Image: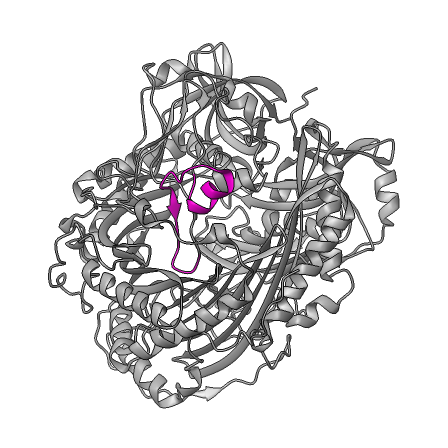
Amino acid sequence: MSGSRSESASPPASGGAPGARRPLPDPRECQRHAERMLSLAKKAGADGAEVLVRDGRELSVKVRLGEPELVKEAGSRGLGLRVIKDHRAAITYTSDFSEEALSKLARDTVELAQLAEPEPLGDLPLPEEMAREIPELGLWDDAVLEIDVTEAIRRARIGEDAALKFDRKVTNSDGAVFGRTVGASAFATSAGFSGSYRGTHASFAVEPICDDADGKKRNGVYWTSSRFVRGLADPEAVGIEAARRTVAKVGARKIPTCEAPVVFSPDAGRGLLGQFAGVMSGGAVWRRSTYLAERVGTAVASELCEVVDDPLLPRGPGSRPYDAEGLASRTNVLVAGGILKTFLCDVFAARKLGRRSTGSAGRAVGGGPHVSTSNLILRPGRTPAAELERLPRGLYVTDLMGFGFNGVTGDYSQGAGGFWIEGGARAFPVSEITISANFDDLWKGVDAVGDDLDTRSSIQVPTFRVARMTIAGS
Amino acid sequence: MTAVPSTTGAGVGFASPLAQIDAAIAERLLAAALGSGGDYADLYFEYRSGADYLMEEGRVRTVGRGVAVGLGVRVLRGDATGYAYTEELSDERMLDAARTAAQIASSGDAPGPIAIRPLTLPSFYGIERSSLELAGTDKVALLRRADAAARAADPRIVRVEASLAEEWREVLVVSSDGHLARDRQPMIRFGVSAVAEEGKQRQGGRSGGAGRFGLEYFLRPGQSPEEHGREAARLAIGMLHAVEAPAGPMEVVLGAGESGILLHEAVGHGLEADFNRKKTSNYTDQVGKAVASPLCTVVDDGTVDHARGSINVDDEGNPGRRNVLIENGILAAYMQDRLSARHFGLTPSGNGRRQSFRHEPLPRMTNTFLSPGQDDPGDIIRSVKRGVYAKHFSGGQVNISNGDFVFSLTESYLIEDGKVTAPLKGVNLIGNGPDVLRKVTMLGNDFRLSDGTWTCGKDGQSVPVGIGTPTLKISEITVGGTRAG
């Protein structure tokens, strides 16, 4: 078991942003803490140990009706330790990085592991499974740090003002929020890997409100998000788009209960794809909590569906150079031509299923490794998105509500809002309805995939259409 | 069989440093927080220690422990909030946080002296010692009992998972108007999930409970590990032969207890004062008006003994209270935090809550419920010709602006000619808050607070809450099934 093998791919952090009192998160310093903790754990008698260290700074500014409503600025860091002793596992975390605290944590965690029962499959990955290099993915932008409170307020005011001026129907505002985070992450494991990286992220959202009949109000939102300042949409454009979407909802009503084709906007479809990946998780498979458990190599979606999980996407919102167990990140094709190609696995799920890890472990400071997606993508098709709405009748969904998905059976039902389509065009806004289907029928029923992939989030989908779903309304 | 060595499980991480925070330190920090001209400031010190135990496939797979400590500093200037936090309680870092939060104001007036006095608080949980100090082996034994009971319940149970989480949270709130409040808030959470298989059919069931208890939680009726295990198994087995749910508007009977999710979503959030201060709720300017059927009296009550949402003191230093929100259908009051109460010229109602020291307080619910009525629950079901009887829920969501809400049923049945018949597959109900509450036509005499592990999310912050109702009938609500017509 070697100590540090890979160097951080990031340059050392520059001394600190103007006005910042605390030094910037430094990946190398995080890595030093992780390696120190690792040696303390070994000294305390651990057979194996993994350490995750995260350090971050956040700034969040909310402007409402032209005035700052909230300015929040802070930094926080944490260390998570997983220890294996006699094939027994314990997980602990702390925010106290003093030598004394870390030594005690090491001893306590090794003792705590005695409460668990031996599970040889839960041992650390083998040294030959470890990542050998850390790819540079372009996750950092110095310009994000240059956005201070004043600049954040300026952008928020411009965006909100544009929304309020867009249409007289915009009568109120739930505000405009600018946020940015910068963070460093390090991981060290006695299986033979030590690495670190850092990243930036900025986002801006505007949420206008319109008055509707019967005292009802209609809210809508539009947002932009990127690891790079120049990747953000212009604040004024965000405000105008937010207002356009909100005004379009005025007069929304129920429709009669029926069956009809349903077009999912990227904002609505994102959640569906996330749930789909959830039932392709190796963790769900060995727990027998997915309807796809026996379905590798069979059709689980229409042949138009290509689903990949790509942690190596340059500048991607969910990109990561290695996974949370120190394995190399790799692009995994989950569904090709509608056929389920693989489950996503971390090391434990892979061992339970007699498979190899797909390098898909994620982890929070306070928890153990689990299967997680990185940049989950439903590949765009060639059909212009607007053509998906050329239907004699159907539903275009912009918003989904509630938690109506049962992964064990695939039964799906959620509250929905959007527009009723008639004669190939949006006829009127719709609210207070539900849409439902079994997930197997839903994904196999995809009969069109648009060309408009939405890349703002770590789950990326284009507009897509399902041939038939049940709509419950009046 | 596996022997587990004896261990106390105590002592991971550090002890609470909050006792060392005295009035002198608080005064110094508050002076810095108000140093730029803020008109109010508060300090929120928090120490949180937790443990979790997970048993899968009859084996304790992982044991986790963690400790977090930190200070959040808030400064108000009019309706604007400056917020900063630190998890290092050194003088330098704490002053840093106070000065950062202070920047929301910019007039530079020096504050006058602050006289700090401790508040005397009620005690709604009365737990002197955290269950974290008890032997870990006792907790593992609880998981084993639940696991065994679920497996023994039926040979079709193929998988069982049991988990236990304990938390001990100490808070110290000091405000620039001189209040100092300390509280110690225990929480225990237990859950069992089971998967049943029969031929190609597979279904899951879950039972869980939570409250401000130590291990005595498990001694209460219906809350033993065995009962949770059997309940999870019962739900999984019962759902194996569930049929497709109907789609469209119909009569719905909501069972006692968990149906309180209806109140939480349909009216609770809309009555939080921040939305009404900003006039973004569909209940804006409705105080004194009829917003529900005269049968409905809705209460938010942070004073229920040991309930998950109870608080001796809220996260702004105001004592927990019982507040009537809707009385016989008339909107009586909103739930106030300090900022909104100032705006409305009212006293805070003990609803200022936050997820942690990293978060600014917001008006939040505690335990929200519908008071009991006169009807016999059996009569309520017998009154329905064709409808749905809903017993268990997995959660809900509301759009504050228009009042549309949805909640998800995990155990429900068809009602045909006044009798409960076939179990239904998971389904959503969707409705509009004021509309649905006007359609409450029967109210049972069987009020029950749910024992569930409810957590409420708002603006990215999660807090534990309680819910409750008697059995009730809604004359029409949209059922989101797959069987149209």
Q: Foreground: B290 or A180?
A: A180
Location of the N terminus of chain B by quadrant is bottom right
Position in image of residue B96 (x %, y %) = 24, 74
**Figure disc tally:** 0
Quarter of image, res A41: bottom left
On the image, the x and y values in percent for residue B316 come to 46, 72
Residue A364 within the magenta-colored segment of the rendering? yes
In the image, the segment drawn in magenta is A345-367
As drawn, B47 above or below B481? below
- In screen coordinates, is A40 left or right of B371? left
Where residue B61 sits, quadrant-wise, is bottom right
In the image, B246 versus A183, the foreground residue is A183
Q: In the visual, does B346 lie left or right of A366?
A: right
The answer to whether residue A444 is magenta is no
Out of B208 and A465, give the one closest to the viewer.
B208
Q: Residue at x 38, y 42 (%)?
A: A360
**Residue B218 % position (x, y):** 71, 66
